[in-house]
Image (spheres, rainbow, N blue to C red):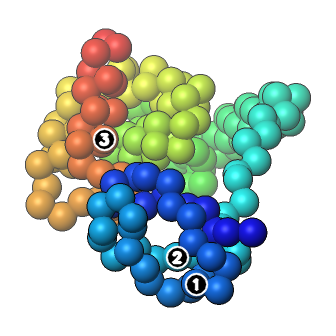
Amino acid sequence: MPIEFHCEHCGKLVRAPDDKAGRRGRCPSCHQSVYIPTPSDKLEPLSLTPTNPKEDEEQERLIRESRELAKRLAMEEATVAGPSEPPTHVPQEVLPPQIDVETVLIEYAKCMAAGDLSVAEELAVELRQHRAAAEEIMQRLTLDELPHPQLAQIPRPVLVGFFKQLRAKR
């Protein structure tokens, strides 16, 4: 049975004998040199099975529950510690006046890049409460010559788009 493949130059269907597999030959249409694939070079089609929506919902529910639990524990510890000294390990999101806007902004960008839009929206709500600081940090993060280490995997135009989207929601 002949090997069938498409020419990488002109896209025409090419048929070659089995004994020519793994060698180079000429496309009969455009006469360019082409690689004749071996049967092992042929890729299996990707199985695009949908994700299980129940598993996704369960995972989101567990994440929400763990965040709520962390908030409750932090609030209880803050109450026990007294007003003079907040606990050192209280999540920043529990103490709005002392929020680390840069950390929240970086988490927002990472969630957007990962496609975790529900968490990104929660962070956006928090960032809107600190607009001036968030705007200053967004400006710095987009103009810095070297990207922030945690944002290095996000292309700069995509990051700018995320921040633009955050500004538009205000």
Dot 3 falls on a residue whose secondary structure is helix
Comparing marks 3 and 2, which lies closer to the viewer? 2
Q: What kind of residue is marked 1?
A: Lys
Question: Label 3 vs label 1: CA separation?
Answer: 45 Å
As helix, strand or loop, the secondary structure at mark 2 comes to loop
> Which residue position holds label 2?
36
Q: Whole-percent x and y of residue 106?
A: 39, 46
Residue under label 1, please give it: 20
**Residue at x-position 30% and y-position 42%:** 159
Which residue occupies the foreground of this view, 28 or 95? Answer: 28
Tell me the residue that label 3 is attached to.
Answer: 158
Residue at point 53% right, 44% down? Answer: 114
Residue contact at pointers 1 and 2, CB within 8 angstroms? yes
Q: Amino acid at mark 3?
A: Val
Is 121 rendered above or below residue 139? above
Quarter-wise, where is residue 77 in the image?
top right
Judge the density around disc 1: few (<14), some (14-19), many (≥20) Cα neighbours within 10 Å. some
